[in-house]
């Protein structure tokens, strides 16, 4: 199996949300938006306000309550929406979270690229 096959398989197992659907869900205090891009990408491409940074390589550690790297915003009981740049890593991340017991997980289909194309705001982080 190659990475393209892995992404295809992950996309078949996870919920896909449009930028409009994500924006509507962000009003709920039970929703956490997780940005799995690398810090350099966040500096270059900007961020979605309120997103929690959890780079893909550390996601499992940040999501596991038993890990010393756990992020308190990540809880299997919360609605978790994952995003990356274009939707591939976020599909893999959402599938991984589901395997870890997160039952209300989805991803932003098309990533921050789709978010921006839909005219949604992006913040530029301070350098």
Image (tube, helix red, strand yellow):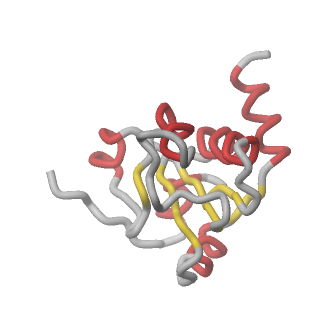
Residue 1 point in image, percent of width and height: 79, 16
Considering every residue shown, the one lying at the far left of the view is 127
Q: Nearer the viewer, residue 15 or 63?
A: 63
Work out whether residue 126 or residue 100 is closer to the camera in this orientation and state it: 100
Answer with the quarter of the image where residue 2 lies: top right
Front-most of residues 24 and 113: 24
- Residue 59, image x, y percentages: 52, 40
List the single residue furthest toward the top: 1
**Which residue shows up at 78% across the image and 44% down it?**
11
Q: Residue 67 location in percent, x, y?
A: 49, 39
Position of residue 25 in the picture relative to residue 127 (left or right) = right
Q: Which residue sits at x=54%, y=76%?
A: 26
Tally of numbered discs:
0
The residue positioned 61% from the left and 45% from the top of the image is 90
The image shows residue 6 at horizontal and vertical percentages of: 75, 28
**Residue 92, quarter of the rendered image:** top right
The structure residue drawn at horizontal position 69% and vertical position 58%, both measured from the top left corner, is 106
Position of 105 with respect to 127 (left or right) is right
């Amino acid at each position: 199996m190659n990475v393209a096959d892995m992404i295809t398989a992950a996309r078949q197992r996870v919920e896909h949300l449009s930028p409009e659907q994500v924006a509507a869900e962000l009003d709920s205090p039970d929703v956490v938006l997780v940005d799995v891009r690398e810090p350099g990408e966040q500096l270059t491409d900007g961020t979605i306000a309120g997103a929690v940074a959890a780079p893909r390589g550390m996601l499992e550690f940040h999501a596991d309550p038993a890990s010393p790297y756990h992020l308190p915003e990540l809880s299997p009981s919360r609605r978790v929406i994952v995003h990356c740049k274009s939707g591939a890593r976020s599909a893999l991340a959402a599938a991984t979270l589901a395997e870890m017991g997160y039952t209300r997980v989805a991803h932003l289909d098309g990533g921050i690229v789709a978010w921006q194309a839909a005219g949604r705001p992006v913040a530029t982080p301070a350098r």
